[in-house]
Amino acid sequence: MKLFKLTSFIVLLFIFNCINAQNLDFDFIKNCINYSDEELIVNLTPKGFRLITKEHKNLGDKLINKSDYYSNKADKEATVEDNAETAIFFNGKRSKKTVFISFTQSQSFNNFNNLEVDIKKNFKKENVFQSEKYESSILKFSNGEVLYYLFKEEDTYYIIIANSPLEDNYFKG
């Protein structure tokens, strides 16, 4: 009986660690725009994320185009065309840096909601505006240097982190 309890405890602990390992934390959100390629990998690998492709081509979205694409999906599940549960597109190769994070499926919504609470608590709310492109209300926050945009579109939640404003050149139609 003791062996069963110990085995059950170890299995539950493993499952809990796997689930939490794939969550992004506030420290990552707060600092990711300043990470080098190496620092990004060092911070994402323990969380269960892996690089899918360098300089991903997505001509339909200029923030994602030529970004490095990371996903928390398993090797055989993840392709660029798939909807990853949490996908990170990092574009730090130019003076205007962006980190585009999408959360899909119910499990990652909890992660988004927790990050939203931390962002609201720790950063200054700049404003709320409507986006023609996403047909959604966009919440804009700032830490004085970096801008954080949060919004929801149907079955996908987003956090976009940028070192320059995106209202006119990205969110408009």
Image: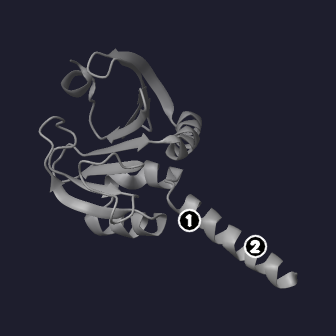
Circles 1 and 2: CB atoms closer than 8 Å? no
Q: Nearer the viewer, residue 1 or 66?
A: 1
Question: In the rendered view, does 88 fall on the left or right side of 28?
Answer: left
Q: Please report the residue visible at 26 percent of the width from the left and 21 percent of the height from the top.
A: 133
**Nearer-N-terminus badge (1/2):** 2
Q: Quadrant of the N terminus?
A: bottom right
Question: In the rendered view, does 61 fall on the left or right side of 90?
Answer: left
Residue type for callout 1: Cys
Residue type for callout 2: Phe
Q: Position of residue 99 (x, y in %)?
A: 31, 46
User: From the viewer's perspective, is residue 46 above or below residue 161?
Assistant: below
Q: Element under label 2?
A: helix
Q: Element under label 1?
A: helix
Q: Nearer the viewer, residue 58 or 163?
A: 58
Q: Position of residue 137 (x, y in %)?
A: 41, 19
Q: Which quadrant would residue 163 be assigned to in this image? A: top left
Q: Please report the residue visible at 22 percent of the width from the left and 21 percent of the height from the top.
A: 168
Q: Tell me the residue that label 2 is attached to.
A: 9
User: From the viewer's perspective, is residue 172 above or below residue 31?
Assistant: above
Q: Which quadrant would residue 15 be assigned to in this image? A: bottom right
Residue furthest bottom as drawn: 3
